[in-house]
Amino acid sequence: MLLLDTEALSAIAHGPALRRDRVRALIIEMRRRELPVATVAAVLAEVVRGRPRDAGVFAGLRRERVEVYPVDTRVGVRAGQLLGATRSGSERAVDAFVVAVADLAGGAVIATVDTRDMDRLAGHATSVLTADIGRA
């Protein structure tokens, strides 16, 4: 599975062309392998603002057929455990939700520009890798 973090979701909605193309290339590869593309509901809190620009987010979700995983009890508990294991604060909660969903799904690739923090969290999960969509 490919999981889109905040920056990856923003990229397919209205991001810089290079970043958008990197995310789309990952999506195309996942589709070729018949693997799902998803994000986590908590990510929407970082990109949706109740403004007309939100239409791009929802259009990107539809266009790329991105499944949105809920933050339920299991995900919340696992995210808290990841934050505890890395001694991170709640400012990393959305990242922890993303890694928790990946971990509970049995593994995933997370598209992100924040590989350092994601890798730190993923180091306490199973089969969770990051794909840097921001590299030069």
Image (tube, grey):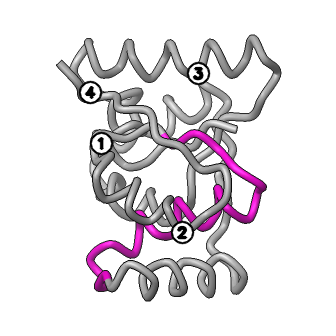
| Mark 4 or 1, nearer chain start | 4
Q: Which structural element holds mark 4?
A: loop
Mostly what secondary structure, the magenta segment?
A: helix
Task: Report the Cα–Cα distance between label 3 and label 2.
Answer: 25 Å
Q: Which residue is mark 4?
A: 15
Q: Quadrant of the C terminus?
A: top left
Task: Report the Cα–Cα distance between label 4 and label 2.
Answer: 30 Å
Task: Report the Cα–Cα distance between label 3 and label 4.
Answer: 15 Å
Mark 3 and mark 2 in contact? Answer it, CB < 8 Å.
no
Q: Which residue is mark 1?
A: 52
Pick the residue in front: 54 or 112: 112
Q: Position of residue 73 (x, y in %)?
A: 70, 86
Q: Which structural element holds mark 2?
A: loop
Residue positioned most to the right: 34
In this picture, is 63 found above or below 36?
A: above
Amino acid beneath label 1: Pro
Q: Nearer the viewer, mark 3 or mark 4?
A: 3
Q: Is residue 78 magenta?
A: no
Q: Quadrant of the N terminus?
A: top right
The quarter of the picture where residue 93 lies is: bottom left
Q: Position of residue 39 (x, y in %)?
A: 57, 49
Q: Position of residue 19 (x, y in %)?
A: 29, 21
Amino acid beneath label 2: His
Task: Report the Cα–Cα distance between label 3 and label 1.
Answer: 25 Å
Q: Nearer the viewer, mark 4 or mark 2?
A: 2
| Mark 3 or 1, nearer chain start | 3
Q: Nearer the viewer, mark 3 or mark 1?
A: 3
Q: Residues within 10 Å of mark 3 (few under 14, many from 20)?
A: many
Q: Which residues are magenta?
A: 88-110
Q: Which residue is mark 3?
A: 27
